[in-house]
Each structure stands twice: as structure tokens, then as C-alpha cells.
Image (cartoon, coloured by chain):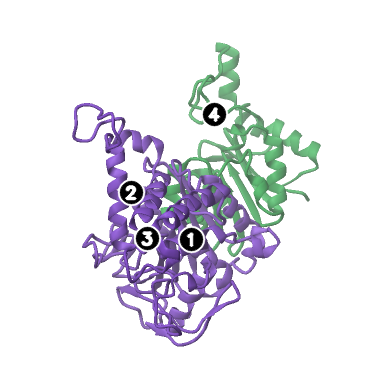
Chain colours: A purple, B green
Amino acid sequence: MTIDRPLPLDSGQQLASVTIAYQSYGTLNADRSNAVLVCHALTGDQYVACDHPTTGKPGWWARMVGPGKPIDTDRYFVLCANVLGSCMGTSGPATVDPATGAPFGMGFPVITIADMVRAQAMLLDHLGIARLHAVVGGSMGGMQALAWASAYPERLVSAIVIASAARHSAQNIAFHEVGRQAIMADPDWQGGQYYAAHAPTKGLAVARMAAHITYLSEAGLTEKFGRRLQARDAKSFGFDADFQVESYLRYQGLAFTDRFDANAYLYITRAMDYFDLAEAHGGRLAAAFAGAGDVRFTLVSFDTDWLYPTAESRRIVQALQSVGAAASFVELSAPFGHDSFMLDVPALDRLVAGALRNGG
Amino acid sequence: MALRPDLAIIADAVPAGTRVLDVGCGDGTLIAALRDKGVDARGLEIDPANVTAAIARGQSVVQGDANHDLGEYPAGAFDYAILSQTLQTTERPDRVIEELLRIAPHAFVSFPNFAHWRIRLALLWNGRMPVTRLLPVAWYETPNIHHLTVSDFRELLRERGIVVERAWYLSGDRPTSAAAASWRAEHAIFLISRG
């Protein structure tokens, strides 16, 4: 869907027109009250519950979204849109700039989480959906859900925020910077204008490898790989992938480059680093939710998630309580680190189903 | 499922249309009863399995500790605060009561009466910390670190200038009189306020 209206951005720039690629599941009811917006994470996409067109893999949250699933598409009209700045059909740095006829590359304006949400609101306007039954997201998806509640509280019945935070910490920014520098250090990056030649896959793969470590827990890595060697009986005394964990990371990095654009990775990580919901409200997070007293919130953290630890969710809950919003919060125990939100955690399924059924 | 007698009394006494915080709400049994009668009831609960069960029922419950997390609620955020069978487990019961009455103008507080005649007799005859129906755990592993009696509670309220609006005393499932409560009540429920 292309919207030929300008999209104003936090940077002060604007995009003359925006294309938003989205998928929908289920049926919008007659009074248009059953729409649920699922917001995806950094490297996610709109293929939340259907096979990915490039990889052929099932949707990234197929265990959560579908007929009879916690986000039940027999009951809800589920929308998932590729975020602004990404590379799965929505406008981003790989998009052709109508002014030049070439991909934007680094000419694409720097965007924020609020810009992503503004674009999603335009999509809802276009679809004639005034109010969402719920906005749901994990990780960066949770940041969008929080930004929704801050910017458009009157358009939300409820928000479900999983393994997320209201700001990026110094550590979060630091890991992202490692990834960005890996991409920009790849000679193929060419200042971002690589679309006619070879993409900086080596840099992007390293970025993904570093990030992937942050999505897992130390105990999870130990359990999965330990110090086991990869297809060999002894160390090679060289720099091949001796260890299983090395081989796994190399595979993860390489596979990622098949489906993701390096510049999009730069832009979206930047948007996450710029995210601090309290910043525009004098540093007071409660003020960011001043209008959200009638929105019902459910927040979930995981005990092994060191990327967005429980303390960040608690900080949000505290702010919500101070504005009188109905908030639920629980820290679930799961072994998978930050990635727990997408993996097999049955308690999460029950929580999401319950939070949705209650109209919140 | 029938509510525990003290919870049934509280559910009955909370007026419809009010905002309530159930501190130590367990799996949300009382919240469910309150919501059925049109009360905006929310909860605070320490055990994540209980919190998960309550949220899965569609309730608004926050995982937290009555000892430390009540300060996060703004003053007067609720009409009623409820603390049922939890006071005797808190680190500083007096501070928790003060917090309840900061968060809400009225609070229900229920607790087992340590001066019930069976407990008195058990102490007198056996010289051992009693293990009873309402206090079924041995002294070394009980969560009840601050046992109290009906008289202790009344005295604390008097010292702090807190008013008893209503009180209920239960022997088993049956009510007993205020005058006899010190001996006969296994369980007491107070509705208190700043007056």
C-alpha cells in the first residue's frame, strides 16, 4: 500500500510518500473493533503467521498468531506491517528515491520508533480502523506498542509489551554500534550505495553474529553448545570454526544476509538507539503516558533476558501505575534469554490470550 | 467455587463501582468475585505462577512485593485496599498498613488471631508453637513471621489513630462477637480508615 501523503519525521525531514507492506489475518468485524496490530522486532517482518517468501520458513510468530492460537485469527483481525526503514516492502534505504531514480541508501532520512508508529497510524487510517483492540509486540515491537500508547492512547484499548524497554541503555547502544561499524567497515558497503554491486554481506553477517549473542542467555548457549567441537575430534590449531557455537553463529550471520538489507539494519538499529520515551517529557516516563490512563497494559519480561532486563519493564509499570492505568506485569522464567518471547514459553501464550480476551 | 469466608465477607462489603487494589491477590479469586459485581479490582502478587494465572483470567495484576512495592502506587489511587491473610507475613506490618491507607482511604485487613483459645491452650499445655488449621506450618518454615492477636491489632490502630469502621470475627465459618473475639475468633477482618 502506498500513501501519497507526506509523512513528517522526528528529524524534521519528511517523506513525500510512503509505501507500507503489510499482511492481514482473520476478518475485520462489522463495527471494526477487533483489529490487533502486531509490531515486529528489529529484523522481523510482516510475515508473522505465514511462510516467509524468501526463506520459506513459517511465520516468525506462527506459534502465537493463527486460528485457535493466543492471538486468535478466528476472533481478531490481525495486522502486521513491515516497519518504516526496513526492507520487506515498506519504504526504507533500499527504496528507489523518486527524485533521483536510484535507491536512497544513506540519503534516506534517519527515522525513529515514533516515525514507525506514525506510519502505522497512517495505514490504519487508510484501512478505516479508528481504534485497535490491542497493539502487541516483543522487543522493538514492544517499543512500538509503548510509543503507540504514548502518541495515540485514544486509538488503543490495550497494549501488550513483551521483553522490551522504554529506552535503549548504553549497553544496548554499544552492541548496536558494533554491528553498524562492522557493516560500514565492509569495503562493499561503499557509503551505502552498493545496490548496483555486491552487498556488504560480510559486515552484515558479523553484525548479526554479535547481535545474536545478545538474544541468548549464557546458560542457554552453554546448554546448546557447551565447548563441543564442530564435526571434528580435536582442535585444529587454526581459525576454522572449531567450536559448534562458532559454526552456529557463522551460519546465523550468513543466513541473515539472504533476507536483510545492510542499510536497513543501520537505520533500524539507529531508531532503536534513539528511543527514549521519557526524553520528550522532561525525562519523566509517567508524563509520556499521561493520556494513557484508560489503556490496559500487559508487560512481560524474562528472567534470562539481559538485553531488556526485568528492571526496564518494572520502570514502565511504575510509570503506568502513577497515571492510574490498569497494568499487569510478570517476569516469566524461561531459559532462552531475550529470544524467549518468540520461543516455546507456554505461560506467555496463556498471558497473551488472557490479556486479549479481557479487552486488554 | 465458594469463596473463603473472609474473602466472601470482603467481596460483599466492597461497593460496586469502586476501585480496589488487592494486595497479595493470589491467583485472583477475590478479584474475580469483585469484578463480577462491577468493581474495578486490580492486584499485587509476589508469586509469578499466581500472577500468570490471574493475567490469564484477564485480570490486571502486577508481580511485586507488598513489603517494597506499595510505594509505587500514587496516594489515593484506589477507594479500597485489601490485605487478606498477608499482614502476618510482612516485614513491617505497621508500615504496610500505613501504605494501604495512603493508597486508599479505606482498607480491609484480615489475619489469623494468634490468641484464639486453641492456640492459647496449645501453648499452655505443650509449650510449643501451635500448628493449627489456619497456621499449618511449623515455626521454622512458616511465612508468618509476625503473629498477632485481635488485641494487638486494635492497639496498633489506636496508637496510629486509625479508625475501625467495621470488624468481622470468624470461628470456623461462623461469626463470633467482638467482645468474645480475643478468645473465640480464629480469624478477624477489619475495615479501617483514617477516620
The kind of residue on which mark 1 rests is Asp
Spatial distance from mark 4 to mark 2, Cα to Cα? Answer: 29 Å
Question: Viewed as shown, does residue A163 lie left or right of B74?
Answer: left
- Point out residue A8 in the picture as x, y percentages from the top left corner: 55, 79
Q: Badge 1 is on which residue?
A: B36
Label 3, on which residue?
A188
Circles 4 and 2 on the same subunit: no
A102 horizontally vs A164: left or right = left
SS under mark 4: loop
Pointer 2 with pointer 1, Cβ within 8 A: no
- Using the numbered discs, state the Cα–Cα distance from disc 1 to disc 3 in whole angstroms: 64 Å
- Expressed as whole percent of the image width and height from the top left, the position of residue A89 reads 35, 74
For marks 4 and 2, give the one nearer the viewer: 2
In depth, the one of A235 and A67 nearer the eye is: A235
Residue identified by numbered label 2: A346
Labelled disc at residue B143:
4
Q: Marks 2 and 1: same chain?
A: no
Chain letter belonging to callout 4: B
Q: Position of residue A302 (x, y in %)?
A: 44, 45
Q: Nearer the viewer, mark 2 or mark 3?
A: 3
Between disc 1 and disc 4, whose residue precedes? 1
| Distance Cα–Cα, label 4 vs label 3 | 63 Å
Name the side, left or right, on which A320 lies relative to A35. Answer: right
First in sequence: mark 2 vs mark 3? 3
Q: Position of residue A180 (x, y in %)?
A: 46, 55
* Amino acid carrying mark 2 in the image: Pro
Distance Cα–Cα, label 2 vs label 1: 28 Å
Residue at point 33%, 60% (across, down): A70
Mark 1, residues whose alpha carbon is within 10 Å: few (<14), some, or many (≥20)? Answer: few
